[in-house]
Amino acid sequence: MTERRRIGLLGGSGVYDLSGLEDPREQVLDTPFGKPSGPYVTGRVDGVPVAFLSRHGQGHRLTPSEINYRANVCGFKMLGCDALLSASAVGSLKEEHAPRQAVIPDQFIDRTRKRVDTFFGDGVVGHVSFAHPVCPTAAGALDAAARASGLAVRLGGTYLCMEGPAFSTRAESLLYRSWGADVIGMTNLTEAKLAREAEICYASLGLVTDYDAWRDATEPVTVETILAILRENAAAARRALREAVGRMNPERDCRCRDAMRDAVLTDRDAISREARRRLEPIVGRYL
């Protein structure tokens, strides 16, 4: 029987904590990539070890571009997590994804431009495969858990990741619809890229709060609208994250956990001591 590794849980707008943890403890970490968004709360869910982090920090202090994604993911890795389940608010780019429903994306489009989204560089080159950016086992666990928690959910779809913090213009929203994107958000792609480099299984539950700016029949998205719907869905989202923990198969045969096996191209003799120290929590076994 494969040992149950710790599962990371990442909360976004409206999901700032996770009640019901057994033996909860706060852990403040400092990583080789700086400080995470805040303290992690470790504990157990039905006996399975977990670690929860609020991505925007306590009191929602960090914009999507200010989040230290590298530190957040590295912290989960340092805590022994081999899976990361995320919950976040998203806007809908298709009529069928109505507010108060959820989407579990399996593809991403990157429209960010101001953030660091790799652990590599500064003397070490790594090219990870990212054609299928979401772990199918983790996505399936989230899907089953969301349904059991009373959410209407769609498994699969494309998440357009924009920079923010302003919402889309109408022209941008119509453009993204023409590309076939399903939902739009500001965080999940960056997390997925870094989780893959850290060999952590990743999937996200996108809670639909609005129709972005493309739909003539509705008002453009506002924070008031988002918060009102998030308050309705927050309890279900927390239930889904907790429920998904028990549905994660510890013996899953996905390739996420050895994604970097052949990805580091730099000659090992050319890697500095500082670079080795920095990358030790992420890919130390390959260096």
Image (spheres, rainbow, N blue to C red):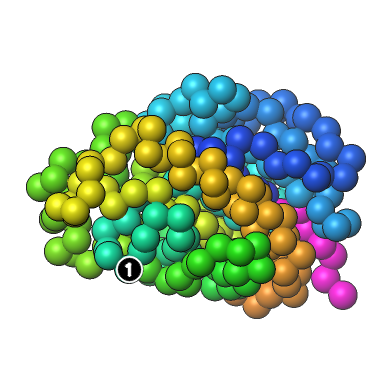
Q: Residue 217, image x and y in percent?
A: 19, 53
Q: Residue at x 56, y 22 (%)?
A: 59
- Please name whichever residue, 58 or 229, is drawn nearer the observer in this view of the structure: 229
Left or right of residue 1: residue 54: left
Q: Is residue 3 magenta?
A: yes
Q: Which image quadrant for residue 84?
A: bottom right
Q: Residue at x 22, y 43 (%)?
A: 219
Quadrant for the N terminus, please.
Answer: bottom right
Task: Classify mark 1: helix, strand or loop.
Answer: loop
Q: Residue at x 13, y 45 (%)?
A: 170
Q: Residues within 10 Å of mark 1 (few under 14, many from 20)?
A: few
User: Looking at the image, can residue 251 be seen?
Assistant: yes
User: Looking at the image, can residue 255 be seen?
Assistant: no
- Please name whichever residue, 206 or 162, is drawn nearer the observer in this view of the structure: 206
Residue at the far front in the pictured view: 217
Vertical placement of residue 126 versus 261, above or below: above
Q: Is residue 4 magenta?
A: yes
- Please name whichever residue, 119 or 204, is drawn nearer the observer in this view of the structure: 204
Q: Residue at x 78, y 30 (%)?
A: 26
Q: Residue 272, image x and y in percent?
A: 53, 36
Left or right of residue 224: residue 155: right
Q: Which image quadrant for residue 168?
A: top left
- Please name whichever residue, 281 or 134, is drawn nearer the observer in this view of the structure: 134
Vertical placement of residue 212 versus 134, above or below: above
Q: In the rendered image, which residue does mark 1 sit on?
A: 96
Q: Amino acid at mark 1?
A: Glu
Region rendered in magenta = 1-7
Q: Residue 165, image x and y in percent?
A: 32, 31
Tell me the chief SS of the magenta region.
Answer: loop
Q: Residue 284, image x and y in percent?
A: 64, 48
